[in-house]
Structure formats: C-alpha cells, structure tokens
Amino acid sequence: MVDKQKELTRPSFGIAFLVVIFLFVLLVVQVIQVGGPDIHLTLIFAISFATIVLMLGGMKWKRIEEGIIHGCKIATIPMLILMLIGMLIPTWIASGTIPVLMYYGLQLISPSMFLFTAALICGIASMSTGSSYTTGATFGVAFMGISMGLGIPGSMAAGAIISGAIIGDKLSPLSDSTNLAAGVCEANLFKHIKSMLYTTIPAFVIALVIYFILGMRYTAETVDSSAVDSILTGLATQFDFSPLISIITLIPLVVVVVLAYRQVSALAVMVIASLVGMFIAMIINGYNIYEMMSFMNYGFVIDTGIADVDRLLNRGGIQAMMWTVSLGYLGLSYGGILEKTGILGALLDKMVALTKNARNLIISHVISALLVNMLSASQYVAILIPGRMYLPAYDRLKIKRHVASRTCEDAATVTSPLVPWGLCGVYFTGTLGVATLEYLPYTYLAIFVPIIAVIYGITGKFIWYNTDEEQAEINREYEDEVLA
C-alpha cells in the first residue's frame, strides 16, 4: 500500500523545478560552448536526470515509462508525416512541380517583395487548408528555392513562410488546434475565431510591414542577375516549362489543397500527393519506378553542372528526415515524462495562485503555455493543460470563455515553431532546411501575438465579460458537476 501511494504521489515543486532547470542549464551550456543545434544527447541526459530524480523521490519506473510511451504516441503521426514529406519533396521535384514554382517565381517575384509575398501567400494557403504542415511542405519548399535564387537569406525566408503558415493553424475552422482550443475551453468555435482576430490580425500586419521594410534592402540591383539567369537556364535544360506541361505539373499541388480542404488525413494526403507526383515524373520526364523509389528514399539527385541548380534540386528523401524524426521522438519523450509524472502540474499550481484579476490571469496563462510548450514539446499539450487549469479562473472572474481559448492559441499555437525540439520546430527545420534558432528572430507573427495578448491583459482591452444570465448558467454547470 505504501509503495502504491508513492507511485501516485505528485512530485513536489522543488523536484519539478530541479528537473526542469537541469534541461535549461544543459541548453545554455550547449549554446555557449557548442553553439550547434544537435540537442539529441542533451535531451537524453535530461531524460536520464529526470528519471533518476523521480525514482529517488519514490516514483515507479513503470509510470515514467508510461510517460515516455505517451510522448512517443503524440509524436508518431507528426513524425510519420515528416517522413512522408521527405518522400513527397523528391517526387515533386522529379515531376517538375517545385521547379515550375521556382522558375516562374524567380521571374515574377521581385527581391524587395519576396518576404512580404511569401508570408501573404502562405497565409492564404494555410487559411484555405487549415494546415501549416501542408503549407510548409508545398509553398514553403518552393519559396525556399526562390529565396536562394534571389539571394534572400534562408533564415528570413523561413521566418516569413512560417509566419504565414501558422495563420491557418490559428484562424482556420479547418485547423485541429483551433478546434482543440475551443473544445478545451468549452467555447463556441466561431466566437473563438472572431476573438483571435483581435490579436492575430494586428500581429500579422506588423509582420508584413517589417517584411516589406526588410525586403527593401534586396533590389534587382543587389541580386546577381547572372546567377539568376544561370539558375533559370539550368532549370529550363532539365524541365519543360511550356504552358501545358507547367499546368500538368501543378496537379499534385491542386490535389493537396483539395484533399486538405476536405479534411482528408494528412498521412493519406502526403501519400496520394507523392504517388501523383511520381506518376507525372514517370510519364512526363521519363523516370522509371526504380529511380523514383531511390529518390523517395534517399532524395532527388541530379548533376546539371550548375552548382546553384544542384543545390536547389538535390534534396528530400525519407532518410534525410531521420535526424529530425529522432529529435521529435526524444523531445516528446521528455515532455511525456513531465506530463504523466505530474511535474507540469506541480509547476503550474504555483501559477494558478497568481490569478486574482484579468491582468494576472492572462499573463500567467501566456507564461504557463510558453513554459509547457518548451517542456512538453507539443502545442497540443500546451493548449490542453493550461487551458483546463485556468478555465475555472476565467469563469470565476466572469471573463468569456472565448478569451480563454484565444489565450491558449496566442501563447501555444503560434509559438510552437520556435521550440527547437518541439513538434512544429522539428517539422519546419526538417521541411525548410533551416535551424529553428536561425529563423526564430524573423518569425514575427509568433513573436508579436503573445506580446499583444499580454498588452490586452494589462490594459483590459478586448477582454469581454459574461452577462449576469451567462454567468448564472456557468455557475449552474459547476453546481451540477459537484452534485454529479
């Protein structure tokens, strides 16, 4: 009986804080001493330390193992999607889909407008599909190729792409995170979306203005026109860009947008889009099935004799994604331990005590969601745990629930691409080929949304309160729960 009690006891705040601070110390040391993005062993050391501390405190190994398995379950679908994107990219290059977007993009998009255009188009695409993953794997990859040709730094390009891509994750009714946040806080979906407009639209406008200003330094005069001409010539010698063929090569992109809009499983979308790209590559460009299988596994390979073109096209493959996949599993394993052993709960308990008014509540919610995002490596956990934990405080202060759901996304959804070992950070690093810490300073939407949320909390702007009738209904809900 004693052992069972120990197994179920939540860690003290001191133990929880020790486990968490150990990871932060390791990361700081790594950044200062090493400076690289390879944090696989850092996470393994953090997992080992957490296991030792928890078991010394009386936690059973079985419960820790359950946390690891729980984290891996969360990671499985996104990591499978990432591997399938590794398969999709070379089929779209071989079919000409990505080269067509690059070829016409290099001619139509001016360098000064590139960052603005990339953010805006990715925003429109993600709103249409409700998926930042789909947007990153399609338009994002193409824009990264265009940025190379125009001489735009990859870190800036990735920041603009991600700022646009996460708009759909936040505002589209087709997005899973949008529906999750509304469900967790028991808010009406469309009231939730309308509430988010007040934080997201100003942040996106600010981001677009900054991208426009940053882009002004890149003009036609600053771009090496001979390099662009060389890339265009190299692409044209390998692919047919006649109008009819160009339209045919865009079929895989249309398939993805339609399937994503119809909310077909992301796994199925990636497989179908890869197969469509493969067949087009075989029919139009003459590749055989064995070449395509090799591309899909190891990445597209071509030797054009032009280094810039080879750099643009030689990429993708399932095996190229495995570094990122392993990081995702390790990050979610660590997060699973923190969630299932009660470490996150022990930390957040201290934050709940600060929720005496709307200002403190929203600031505490934002900080907590950011903390959980970093520790759990999952935006879903960062929406779910703080959202459920703070909801009674919103009800107690008579604040409408769609303000609570909005704060979930303001702090969790938009910041998830900024966590190097988190699901979104791992995904975009693997898909766009830019390390999280490199694109982080340019992902302005993710930076400004939580800041605006905190400003609203401090000033009381756009914080709506229940009417007496609405509050009475909420109070009755709590009374019914107690009676039940």
Image (cartoon, rainbow, N blue to C red):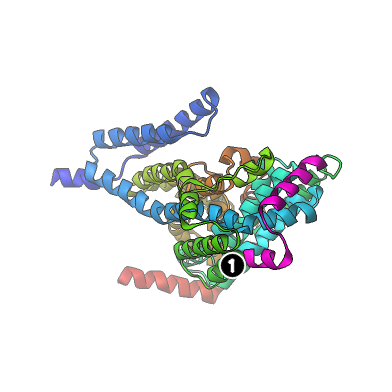
Report the side of 212 relative to 80 (left or right). Answer: right
Residue 447: x and y in percent read 64, 47
Residue 438 or residue 21, whichever sits in front: 438
> Relative to the observer, which residue lies in front, 212 or 393?
212
Side of 444 relative to 414 (left or right): right
Farthest top residue? Answer: 33
Residue 132 or residue 266, whichever sits in front: 266
Q: Residues within 10 Å of mark 1 (few under 14, many from 20)?
A: many
Residue 236 within the segment the image draws in magenta: yes
The C terminus - image quarter = bottom left
Work out whether 180 lies above or below 163: below
Pointer 1: what residue?
257
Identify the main secondary structure in magenta. Answer: helix
Residue 354 appears anywhere in the view: no
Q: Position of residue 293 (x, y in %)?
A: 46, 53
Q: Residue at x 36, y 44 (%)?
A: 333
In the rendered image, the residue lying farthest to the right is 221
| Callout count | 1
Residue 15 location, quadrant: top left
| Residue 96 visible to an observer of this rendering | yes
Q: Residue type at mark 1?
A: Val
**Image: 328 above or below 98:** above
Q: Which residues are magenta?
A: 223-250
Q: Secondary structure at mark 1?
A: helix
Magenta highlight on residue 99:
no
Residue 440, image x, y percentages = 62, 42
The structure residue drawn at horizontal position 48% and vertical position 58%, both measured from the top left corner, is 393
Residue 129 in which image quadrant: bottom right
Q: Residue 175 location in percent, x, y? A: 53, 65
